[in-house]
Amino acid sequence: MLLANLVTCSNLHLLIDREELMPTDDITRKVSERYARAAATGEQMCCPTAYDFDDLRSFIPEEVLRISYGCGTPAGLATVLSGETVLDIGSGGGIDCFDAARRVGPTGRVIGIDMTETMLEIARRNALLVSRNLGYAASNMTFHRGMADAMPVEDDSIDLIISNCVINLAPDKRAVFREMYRALKPGGRFTISDIVSDQAVPQYLVHDAQKWGDCLSGALPMWEYFEGMRNVGFLGVHQVASRPWHAIDGIHFLSLTLTGYKLPHSMPRPDVYATLRGPFSDATDELGRTYVRGVPQLIDDRTAQLLGTPSLEPLFILTEQPMTAPPDASPWLSVLPEDRPCVWKGDYAILMTALTQAADDDHHIYQRGVPLEVCSKTLTVLEHAAYRPCFAIYNRASEVVQGTQIDCAPAGGCC
Ligand SMILES: C[S@@+](CC[C@H](N)C(=O)[O-])C[C@H]1O[C@@H](n2cnc3c(N)ncnc32)[C@H](O)[C@@H]1O
């Protein structure tokens, strides 16, 4: 990253706006024009969110709330600590920045980045009002013009990155993921909401600027999203929430909120053994190590860090000596399918946790981000509290299905 244009903003170094470097490809220009128009007119667009608007209304002006165009509620904000630095990619009218500004308190900082000047003007104008409403002596927010794939922030400077329904709009998602990794401090994290698809979006939709601006055409298939994050170095990447949103020509779009970590450099530590507790019968982590339930194995420091991240921590037992409990002992957690007929109803399960692959006790193999059709019996198993956080479940049937019962006893194995 070029540091030639360094300027100082309070305790944070920011690179000055690099408008001359901003890409002017056709889709990006049309997306920007679209959001400039929406901001100016207050048009309703985009996707359902889960804000507590009554709460937000107590300190955020209506002008901002009216142009909330997110597709989730960056739940990561609930993890923010006082004094942290938060970066919002594609901050729009500023709704999430303002919420973050309240949570980090007057000693924290919030940086919003957006490519659309009309959005930035609204956010900047309201930042002063929000700071006053929060009782801060000075604003703890700054808003900068910039692209998601070339962000005007210094390396290793951010504690938490948030983003709400923006990355799908960027032409080069991998470059955005690289930028996120660069900007985060070691030990930093992201929580982003975005639209993803259950299969590759065909070219006739990719080249539809209207649908790109609607947060549809630019959606990445889920497995590519996870792989893109892993390829740049993020670990512990898992869903916080997911919700089916829209379907076009059999392509299903989901609103997904994901968290992941730029883990700090690992410190040498005494030997650690990891034992997969369950509910999976075997599983592969993001570093490529495979575990069988109940079988301890010596792991390295990096793996120990990874298995301590929130989505994996409940699935593993870490000990200084190999565990010797028999496989049916209470620490192991298995969820067996019931012995009764199954019905196919169009349900699909997608593994969404920080494992690249995992198997259940009925021999299903789930690949992260890849939809697998499941019968009613398997659905019941995946609804179990131990499995549920690891999966997104959605239905692909566009008409009511008859659902003939099939004998799908565990020994027979039908799916
Ligand atoms: C769907 S709106 C979401 C705005 C805001 N996050 C919210 O929740 O209301 C998308 C925003 O991202 C901005 N945007 C889209 N693509 C971008 C890119 N590649 N780089 C920077 N900003 C981008 C748009 O200008 C717009 O303000």
Image (tube, rainbow, N blue to C red):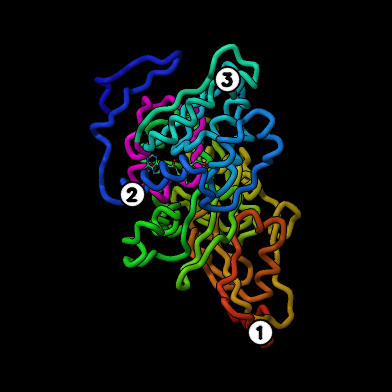
Residue bounds of the magenta highlight: 147-176
Label 1 sits on residue: 403
- Which of discs 2 and 1 lies nearer the camera? The answer is 2
Which of the two residues, 247 or 316, is positioned nearer the viewer here? 247
Q: Is residue 191 above or below residue 111?
A: below
Counting other residues with Cα less than 10 Å from the Cα at mark 1, is it few (<14), some (14-19), or many (20 or more)? few
Residue 74 can be seen in this image: yes
- Image quadrant in which you'd find residue 282: bottom right
x 66%, y 34%: residue: 56
Task: Tell me which amino acid carries mark 2.
Answer: Lys
Q: Where is residue 124 in the image (x, y as percent from the top left)?
A: 47, 26
Measure how far apart labels 2 and 3 are at the Cα level: 37 Å
Asked whether mark 3 and ligand 1 are closer than 8 Å, the reply comes as no
Q: Is residue 159 above or below residue 203?
A: above
Which of the two residues, 372 or 94, is positioned nearer the viewer here? 94
x 59%, y 11%: residue: 137
Label 3 sits on residue: 83
Q: Earlier in the sequence, mark 2 or mark 1?
A: 2
Q: Is residue 246 above or below residue 226?
A: below
Q: Where is residue 208 in the image (x, y as percent from the top left)?
A: 34, 61
Label 2 sits on residue: 30
170 within the magenta span: yes
Furthest residue to the right? Answer: 330
Task: Tell me which amino acid carries mark 3.
Answer: Gly
Measure how far apart labels 1 and 3 are at the Cα level: 55 Å
Q: Where is residue 162 in the image (x, y as percent from the top left)?
A: 51, 37
- The quadrant of the image that shows the N terminus is top left
Counting other residues with Cα less than 10 Å from the Cα at mark 3, is it few (<14), some (14-19), or many (20 or more)? some
Q: Position of residue 95 (x, y in %)?
A: 56, 35
> Dot 3 lies on which element?
loop
